[in-house]
Image (cartoon, grey):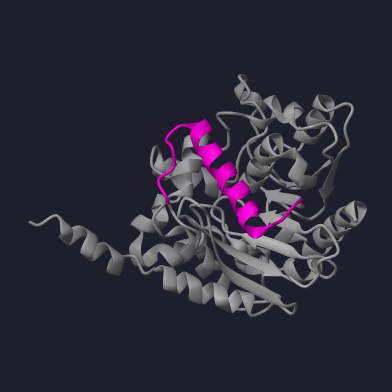
C-alpha cells in the first residue's frame, strides 16, 4: 500500500483544522467590548506568533503581556481582556507551538526547548516594539515568563505568576507528593510515554466529546459568555493540531507535573529589582508553598504571594472578577 494513504485518511478522521480553530476563536473574540487588533507577528526565523492586542490606543502606561499555559491560547483570557485593558494596552499571544502560532520542531532537550520558547517571546517583543512590560504567565506560561525574566530583566517592570508550573524540586519522599487531579492521572495512565494530549488526536471524531467529558468545568467557568460548547471546541482545536509546543513541554518535564529544570533552583538569578507577585488558586493541585520558598530565595527583593478563594488551577477563569481586580491593582502599582 502507498505510504500516503494513512496521512490522507487521518485529517478526515480527526475533525479539526486551523480554519476551524480560527472560526471558533473568532466567536470568542466577538465578546470583546474594547477595541482590539488580531494578527500574525512574523519573527526573523520565519515563525509567526498569533497576537491579540486590546486597547492599542492606550499608550500612556506600561502594557500588560499575558502568557497562557499548556494547551491554552489567547481565547482563554476572554473573561479578563476587557477589564485588564480598561486603562492600558493588553497583549496576548499564542505561544510558539500552540494555538494558531507556528508549530516548528523544537530541540529535544529540556534546556533547548525552554530557550526556544524564551527566544521566541523576546523576538516577538522586539517585532512588536514593546520597550518594557508587566509580564504575566499562567502555569507553563509562568515558568516561561520566569525564565524570560532571568534573561531579559530590563524588559520586565513586574512579573506576575499565576499558579506557575515547574517550580518545586521533585521530592524524594513519595509521601510529600501532592496528588494531581483524577483526570490528569487518567490521561497519564492511558498515555504513558506519548505526548500529554495524544489521546485527543487518536480519538478522532470522539475528540471534541472527550474534552467535554474530561473537563466539564471549562464550560461552567465560561458560562456567562457561552451557553454552548464554544470553549470546549476551542480547547479541542487548539490541541488536535500537529503537536509542537506539546512535544517541547514533554521534553521539559519528568513524570507528569515535575520540571526537569525546576525554577526554584534558578529564581535567585532574576535581577533583585524585578518585583514578583505570585497568585494561586486556594484549591489548586500546584504546590502553593512555592511562594514562601521564592521569598526565601529573594530576601532583598519584592515578593508577594496570595491565594484566591474558590479558585483552582485556572484562577483567571474560576474567579475572574477577583483575579482581574488583583492584577489591575498590581498594574496600577507600576504606573
In the rendered view, tell whether residue 80 sits above or below residue 190: below
For image coordinates 46% across by 65% down, the residue present is: 237
Question: Which residue is at a point 85% across and 68% down the rendered structure image?
Answer: 87
What segment carries the magenta color?
104-132
Q: Where in the figure is residue 193, as x and y percent of width and height?
A: 39, 37
Residue situated in front as seen by the camera: 178 or 201: 201
Whether the magenta-drawn stretch holds residue 129 is answered as yes
Q: Is residue 246 above or below residue 335?
A: above
Identify which residue, 210 or 34, lies in the foreground.
34
Q: Position of residue 156 (x, y in %)?
A: 77, 45
Q: Which of 35/9 is in front?
A: 35
Determine whether, in the image, residue 210 is placed left or right of residue 28: left
Residue at the image point whose x is 79% and y is 35% from the top: 291
Q: Is residue 248 above or below residue 212?
A: above
The residue shown at (57%, 57%) is 72
Residue 275, quarter of the rendered image? top right
Q: Is residue 1 above or below residue 275?
A: below
The answer to whether residue 312 shows anywhere in this view is yes
Amino acid at each position: 500500500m502507498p505510504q500516503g494513504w494513512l496521512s490522507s485518511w487521518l485529517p478526515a478522521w480527526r475533525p479539526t483544522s486551523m480554519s476551524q480553530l480560527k472560526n471558533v476563536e473568532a466567536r470568542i473574540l466577538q465578546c470583546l467590548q474594547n477595541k482590539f487588533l488580531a494578527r500574525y507577528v512574523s519573527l526573523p526565523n520565519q515563525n509567526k506568533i498569533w497576537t491579540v492586542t486590546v486597547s492599542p490606543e492606550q499608550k500612556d502606561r506600561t502594557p500588560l503581556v499575558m502568557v497562557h499555559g499548556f494547551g491554552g491560547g489567547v481565547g482563554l483570557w476572554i473573561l479578563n481582556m476587557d477589564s485588564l485593558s480598561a486603562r492600558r494596552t493588553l497583549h496576548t499571544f499564542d505561544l510558539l507551538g500552540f494555538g494558531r502560532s507556528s508549530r516548528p520542531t523544537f530541540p529535544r532537550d529540556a534546556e533547548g526547548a525552554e530557550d526556544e520558547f524564551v527566544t521566541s517571546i523576546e523576538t516577538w517583543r522586539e517585532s512588536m516594539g514593546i520597550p518594557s512590560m508587566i509580564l504575566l504567565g499562567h502555569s507553563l506560561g509562568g515558568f516561561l515568563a520566569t525564565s524570560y525574566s532571568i534573561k531579559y530583566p530590563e524588559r520586565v517592570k513586574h512579573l506576575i505568576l499565576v499558579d506557575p508550573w515547574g517550580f518545586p524540586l521533585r521530592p524524594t519522599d513519595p509521601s510529600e507528593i501532592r496528588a494531581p487531579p483524577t483526570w490528569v492521572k487518567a490521561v497519564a495512565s492511558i498515555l504513558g510515554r506519548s505526548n500529554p494530549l495524544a489521546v485527543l488526536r487518536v480519538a478522532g471524531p470522539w475528540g471534541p466529546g472527550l474534552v467535554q467529558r474530561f473537563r466539564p468545568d471549562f464550560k461552567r467557568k465560561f458560562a456567562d459568555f457561552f451557553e454552548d460548547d464554544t470553549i470546549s471546541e476551542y480547547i479541542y482545536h487548539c490541541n488536535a493540531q500537529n503537536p509542537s509546543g506539546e512535544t517541547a513541554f514533554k521534553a521539559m518535564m519528568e513524570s507528569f507535573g515535575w520540571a526537569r529544570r525546576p525554577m526554584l533552583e534558578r529564581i535567585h538569578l532574576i535581577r533583585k529589582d524585578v518585583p514578583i507577585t505570585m497568585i494561586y488558586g486556594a484549591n489548586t493541585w500546584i504546590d502553593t508553598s512555592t511562594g514562601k520558598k521564592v521569598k526565601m530565595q529573594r530576601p532583598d527583593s519584592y515578593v508577594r504571594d496570595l491565594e484566591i478563594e474558590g479558585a483552582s488551577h485556572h484562577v483567571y477563569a474560576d474567579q475572574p472578577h477577583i483575579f482581574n481586580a488583583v492584577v489591575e491593582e498590581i498594574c496600577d502599582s507600576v504606573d
